[in-house]
Amino acid sequence: MTKERSEKESVYREVWNTLSKVDVNEHAQEKAGLTYLSWAWAWGVLMEHYPEATYEFPDERIYADGTVSVECVVYIRGHERSMWLPVMDYRNNAVENPNARAISDTKMRCLVKCVAMWGLGHYIYAGEDLPADPPKPSQKASSKKNGKAKKKIVETVATELGAKEVPGWSGIIEAKTYEELASVYKENVDSWKSFGEETYTEIIKECSKRKGQLKKEMENGSA
C-alpha cells in the first residue's frame, strides 16, 4: 500500500469514526415518509469537527423528460465524497421543469445527504431503497391479522400457485441489515406481485415490520 493511499484511507476512517458517533435523532424530522436533517445544523456540526471542510454543487443534470437532479461534493482535508438527488415534490416524485426555489431546496438536502456519506446521520438514510410502508389497516382488521400474516400468505400462495413457501419469506425474517432486507425485496418483488394485491400487501407489511425493527436496533446501537 502506498503512503498516499494509506493517508487517504486514514482521513476517511478518522472522519467517519468521528461523525458517525454523533446522535442526530433529536434533530431529525419526518416528512412524506422520509427523514430530514436541517442543513444548517448538519453543517454546524461538521464545522465544529472539521472547520476546513468545503462543498460545491456541479451543474444540474437535466433529463429528457424535463426532470432535474443535483449533485453535491463535500471536501475534507483534500479528499471528497459526492452525492446526488432528484428534485422532488411532496410525494417524492421527480418534478418536471422545477423552478429555482425547488432546485435550491434540493441542493441543501443533497448537501446534508453528502455530509452523511462522511458519517453524520448516515443511519437515518438506511433503507431508502426498501418499499414504502403500506396503508395502515383498521384497528379491527389489524387485531385479527396479528400473528397470522404468514399463515394467511402461505395459504393464499399455496391455493393460487401451489407454492409450499413464500419466496424470500425467511429472508425477511432473518435479515440482519437494511442491505440484506433490500436484497430480499429486489430478488422476490416480481414473484410477490404475481400472487395478487392482497397477498403482496401482506408481504410488504412484513418487510415494513422488519424494517422498523432494524431501525430501532440501529438507533439503540448509536445511542
Image: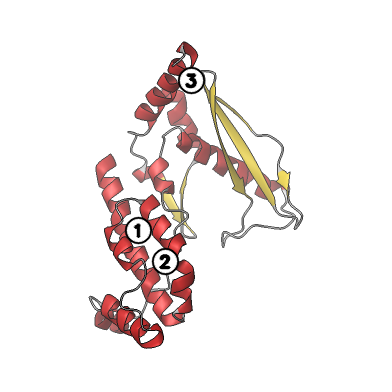
Question: Of tags 2 and 3, which is closer to the observer?
Answer: 2
Q: Position of residue 179 (x, y in %)?
A: 39, 50
Q: In this orientation, which residue lies closer to the viewer: 206 or 48?
A: 206
Q: Mark 1 and mark 2 in contact? Answer it, CB < 8 Å.
A: yes
Q: Position of residue 92 (x, y in %)?
A: 57, 59
Q: CA distance from mark 1 to mark 2?
A: 9 Å
Which residue: 26% across, 80% down? 151
Which element type, helix, strand or loop, lies under badge 3?
loop
Q: Mark 1 or mark 2, which has the lower sequence index? A: 2
Q: Position of residue 17 (x, y in %)?
A: 35, 28
Residue 166 position by quadrant? bottom left
Left or right: 179 as drawn, with respect to 60: left
Q: Amino acid at mark 1?
A: Lys
Residue 168 position by quadrant? bottom left
| Residue located beneath label 2 in the image | 133
Left or right: 110 as drawn, with respect to 31: right
Q: Amino acid at mark 2?
A: Asp
Crowd around label 3: few <14 · some 14–19 · many ≥20 (10 Å): few
| Residue located beneath label 1 in the image | 211
Q: Is residue 167 visible?
A: yes
Which residue: 41% across, 23% down? 49
Crowd around label 2: few <14 · some 14–19 · many ≥20 (10 Å): some
| Residue located beneath label 3 in the image | 51
Q: Mark 2 and mark 3 in contact? Answer it, CB < 8 Å.
A: no
Crowd around label 1: few <14 · some 14–19 · many ≥20 (10 Å): many
